[in-house]
Amino acid sequence: MGPCCFSAQDQFDNLEKHTQWGIDVLEKYIKFVKERTEIEINYAKQLRNLSKKYQPKKNSKEEDEYKYSSCRAFLATLNEINDYAGQHEVISENMTSQITTELARYVQELKQERKSHFHDGRKAQQHIETCWKQLESSKRRFERDCKEADRAQQYFEKMDADINVTKADVEKARQQAQLRHQMAEESKAEYSSTLQKFNHEQHEHYHTHIPNIFQKIQEMEERRIVRLGESMKTFAEVDRQVIPIIGRCLDEITKAAESINQKNDSQMVIEAFKSGFEPPGDVDFEDFTQPIKRTISESSLSNSKDGKSESRFSSKSKGKLWPFIKKNKLSLKLGAGPEDFSNLPPEQRRKKLQQKVDELNKDIQKELDQRDALTKMKDVYIKNPQMGDAASVDHKLAELGQNLEKLRLEEQKFLGWLAEVEGRLPVRTEPARRQSGLYEPQNTLTVNNCAQDRESSPDGSYTEEPSQESELKAPPPDFDDEFDDEEPLPTIGTCKALYTFEGQNEGTISVTEGETLYVIEEDKGDGWTRIRRNEDEEGYVPTSYVDVFLDKNVKGAKTYI
């Protein structure tokens, strides 16, 4: 192959690499615009969420706030921000339709055109290479025939000069030489014709075909560059088109801000909160130079003292209710664990279980309503097949049946626990569970009153009437005046702390996991056990936090049930 062929091939390789790079640039720009559209969509979404987040909630106190001009201006700002977000969505949509979609289609067309041009180039290159090979073959054949003709001529002359050779051999050699000369002439003519043809094809190749292909590739590349520039202009134009609308949104925000009237807002506050009372008159001068009656002073002083002592007694008696309230709150905090609420006092546990049963009943009723509706729908389908397929409802009915079965099993489980709790609650004829010899008769009323106060407390632990509570069951095991007893309770066993408990409420005691302590009062069904660490430290801990080991003779030693 001639050096010119190799030079053309090298140019094709360079152009192929460059045009591929151009396509890569277009695809990179398409990716850039796609990411820009995603940013615009996300920004618009965030703006809409922001506007929605601060919109006033219906039927709420926030709606009343928007009677003030400043709040109305803020609402207008939120609405304009929503419109502002819409313009960013328009940017994203226009960039997608006018740039990314169009460029993606153009890139596919460009790839096909590029492939066609380089296919034509390779085809032209292969054609000129074939012509070159034909020329080389004709040339070699002509050279070979010439050499054969020379050798035949020399052999003839040699035979003709030899007197020992017969005339027939000489004639044969002469004919062979003539044949070889004739073949050489034919090869020469063929070589000349092939050479002329190659020169013509080569001229056409380098002056017509290849320049035309290069021109097409150049035009294709220039169109790509122009298209990229037009896309960049469109990129800017899409933004520019929404600028007037965004400007109007900003103008509306400014207009809303300028509409704020501080005087009217202040007047509305005055109208809303003015009392209508007349201002008080002047304070009269009190003359203390007149003699003061001692009896009045002494009477006032004695009344004041009585009031103070009464206040102290009231605060003291009221302070005794504090441990009960604290205990209830603590019990509620600790009662978030077991499914059967076994860590709660009996009445609280009963209430929680009843609440759970009511919830399950509502769920069951909801499922039953759905099943009835589907059953009616199935009946309609059976009577009127053109309205729907009755078999399509069977799967949903079977699913509802399974859900009902699960809910009923769950209800039976909680009903069992509820029956267990209600069976354990003391009845009217049972003796009080905590009548210990350490309780004085005059303290009984106080304990009952404390229990009643706890039942009516906002904790919602007990809901029965106070009179029924005192009649139906003994006073609950609360933290009472036992801490003030002069004689400490005897130990009835030991216990080991299973978990660490921080006794931060009054009447409780802190324990550490693994610690061994003395039991001085067993759990009476309220989930609390009274323990002692030493003579100065004792209090209640949750029964589930300790492992209790009672003494064997504890029944004989105990004076309470």
Image (spheres, rainbow, N blue to C red):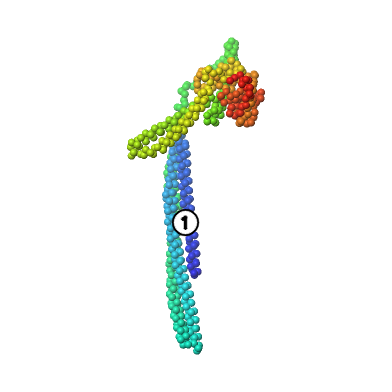
Using residue 369 as the reference point, say whether residue 531 is left or right of it.
right
Circle 1 sits on which residue? Answer: 23
- Residue 108: quadrant of the picture: bottom left
Mark 1 burial class by Cα count in 10 Å: few <14, some 14-19, many 20+? some
- Residue 497: quadrant of the picture: top right
What is the quadrant of the C terminus in the image? top right
Residue 298 percent across, percent down from the top left = 59, 12
Residue 108 shows in this picture: yes
Furthest residue toward right? 535
Q: 312 and 64: which one is in front?
A: 312
Q: Is residue 130 above or below residue 532?
A: below
Residue 63 shows in this picture: no
**Amino acid at the residue labelled 1:** Ile
Seen at 61% across and 17% down, the residue is 437
Furthest residue toward front? 552
Q: Secondary structure at mark 1?
A: helix
Seen at 47% across and 72% down, the residue is 136
Residue 268 percent across, percent down from the top left = 45, 29
Q: Is residue 208 above or below residue 288?
A: below
Seen at 37% across and 36% down, the residue is 378
Residue 278 percent across, percent down from the top left = 47, 21
Residue 66 percent across, percent down from the top left = 44, 33
Q: Is residue 492 above or below residue 386?
A: above
Q: 218 and 480: which one is in front?
A: 480
Q: 198 and 442: which one is in front?
A: 442
Question: How many numbered marks are there?
Answer: 1
Q: 198 and 71: which one is in front?
A: 198
Furthest residue toward bottom? 163
